[in-house]
């Protein structure tokens, strides 16, 4: 066990716990617990908003799984990863002011709150909650696995022991601190990610004898490593192009990202976050995946791709510097885990329990439910993560695709198309979920249909279903402005 590496990481975790404790003190005096716990009171400034979006999106797959896959496939995976640069830009430009304004008018605390008010449908709410719970369990399991892999690589502990330590660390500060703790720690974690990425990239280049030397070593081993088509030449142009739907435009449909577009303070904060988020995302995605490729000549023969980053850091950096740098993937993992935990917790407590089981629940009961559900979810994900796959990035991407197929059109067309109604939303979500799961298993057995990524066809089918059912079953426009006015008048 390398204590010189562990001490900086322990110091980092203590800072995170302090932020969680401070946030819990703020919650204790809150007059609006639900909004503060699950949305931070809608007080995020531009920098914090940008960093919480980057930190939430930049997860274990970006800092461990993605570089591990780049180590295996070469520059083809770096090219795919760079389609994620526009993530924050698309989310804030497409949802933008209108989404935040409508969320405030609806008093929406979660994305499902928005969908419930927009479509006035119990079926939409239950389908949404089902989708979030099912697919985000996969995403959370991926993060748990990534955190355990990192601790395992650093300490020499067994995978199960490392998983237990990681789970306890995250559950403590998320459960007590809520969204405010998540947003503030994301700002700290985002800064750590930036610095850690830069330091590790420089160290790897120096250790490899410079970029030209590293490139020559890669060509000598396998010329395909430096092409856009992957080590085996199996990354087709159709797959690379369609992958942009999954990690570019489609990110608008991810609940954990969309909820941040309703949490900022004002328009100035949004505009600042748009610029900062795009720059930071591009820097991290490019350089972390380059590190994965550049590590191949330095440390050949790594069997588990998810261990590439911790192993290359330990190889190329002094122990205490490696400890600081490896706080970056730990930050990425924790920042995503906390957001996903709160999102699933809010779906159960706010969208199901308070809407349909006990609408008149007292504040004390709501607090107990929020804390309890968040804790129980963490335990369930811990059990799911006990038997990990080889490359966790594919587990994470499976969850991303399912959520996008379910939510992208009910959110986007719900904002911008007045003819959209509950029938279209229900049909779109059902079509997206069913076709995505079916195609996922078909592609595993037979290879990708038409050579495109699994998410492509379900997104197209869910769009057609939304438009067709909105127009065919109820031809008149579903004027949600009228519903909004009625709701405000009643309130």
Image: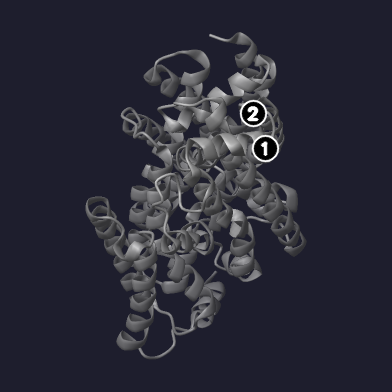
Q: Quadrant of residue 278?
A: bottom right
Q: Tell which of 138 and 25 is nearer to you.
A: 138
218 over 300 or under it: above or below: below
Q: Secondary structure at mark 2?
A: loop
Label 1 packing within 10 angstroms: few (<14), some (14-19), many (20+): few
Left/right placement of residue 482 relative to residue 266 reads: left
Q: Quadrant of residue 322?
A: top right
Q: Residue at x 43, y 80 (%)?
A: 420
Q: Are marks 2 and 1 in contact (CB under 8 Å)?
A: yes
Residue to which mark 2 is pinned: 208
Q: Quarter of the image for the C terminus: give it.
A: bottom right
Q: Residue at x 31, y 87 (%)?
A: 472
Left/right placement of residue 323 relative to residue 397 reads: right
Residue 431 picture location, percent across and down: 30, 68
Q: Residue at x 59, y 19 (%)?
A: 314
Res 260 visible? no
Q: Which mark is residue 389?
A: none
Q: Tell which of 442 and 422 is nearer to you.
A: 442
Residue to which mark 1 is pinned: 211
Q: Residue at x 56, y 76 (%)?
A: 489
Q: Secondary structure at mark 1?
A: helix
């Amino acid at each position: 066990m390398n204590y010189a590496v562990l001490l900086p990481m322990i110091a980092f975790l203590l800072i995170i716990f302090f932020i969680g404790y401070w946030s819990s003190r703020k919650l204790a005096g809150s007059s609006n617990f639900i909004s503060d716990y699950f949305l931070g009171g809608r007080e995020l400034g531009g920098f914090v908003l940008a960093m919480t979006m980057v930190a939430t999106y930049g997860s274990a797959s970006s800092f461990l799984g993605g570089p591990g896959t780049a180590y295996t496939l070469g520059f083809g995976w770096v090219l795919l990863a760079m389609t994620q640069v526009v993530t924050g830009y698309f989310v804030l430009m497409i949802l933008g002011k209108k989404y935040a304004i409508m969320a405030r008018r609806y008093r929406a605390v979660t994305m499902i709150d928005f969908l419930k008010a927009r479509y006035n449908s119990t079926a939409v709410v239950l389908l949404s909650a089902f989708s979030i719970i099912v697919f985000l369990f996969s995403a959370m399991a991926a993060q748990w696995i990534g955190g355990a892999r990192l601790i395992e690589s650093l300490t020499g502990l067994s995978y199960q022991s490392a998983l237990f330590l990681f789970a306890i660390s995250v559950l403590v500060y998320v459960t007590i601190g809520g969204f405010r703790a998540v947003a503030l720690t994301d700002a700290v974690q985002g800064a750590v990610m930036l610095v850690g990425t830069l330091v590790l990239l420089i160290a790897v280049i120096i250790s490899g004898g410079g970029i030209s030397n590293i490139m020559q070593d890669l060509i000598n081993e396998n010329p395909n490593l430096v092409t856009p088509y992957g080590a085996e030449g199996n990354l087709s142009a159709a797959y690379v192009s369609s992958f942009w739907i999954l990690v570019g435009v489609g990110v608008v449909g991810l609940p954990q990202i969309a909820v941040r577009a309703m949490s900022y303070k004002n328009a100035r904060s949004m505009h600042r976050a748009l610029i900062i988020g795009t720059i930071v995302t591009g820097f991290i995605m490019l350089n972390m995946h380059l590190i994965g490729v550049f590590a191949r000549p330095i440390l050949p023969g790594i069997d588990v791709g998810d261990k590439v980053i911790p192993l290359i850091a330990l190889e190329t950096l002094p122990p205490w510097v490696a400890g600081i740098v490896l706080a970056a993937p730990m930050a990425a993992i924790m920042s995503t885990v906390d957001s996903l935990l709160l999102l699933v917790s809010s779906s159960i407590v706010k969208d199901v329990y308070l809407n349909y089981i006990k609408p008149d629940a007292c504040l004390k009961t709501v607090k107990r439910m929020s804390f309890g559900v968040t804790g129980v979810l963490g335990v369930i994900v811990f059990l799911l993560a006990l038997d990990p796959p080889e490359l966790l990035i594919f587990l994470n991407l499976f969850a991303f695709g399912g959520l996008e197929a379910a939510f992208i059109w009910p959110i986007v067309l719900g904002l911008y198309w007045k003819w959209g109604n509950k029938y279209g939303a229900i049909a779109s979500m059902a079509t997206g979920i069913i076709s995505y799961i079916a195609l996922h298993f078909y592609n595993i057995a037979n290879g990708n249909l038409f050579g495109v990524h699994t998410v492509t066809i379900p997104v197209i089918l869910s769009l057609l279903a939304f438009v067709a059912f909105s127009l065919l079953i109820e031809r008149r426009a579903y004027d949600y402005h009228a519903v909004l006015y009625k709701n405000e008048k009643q309130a």
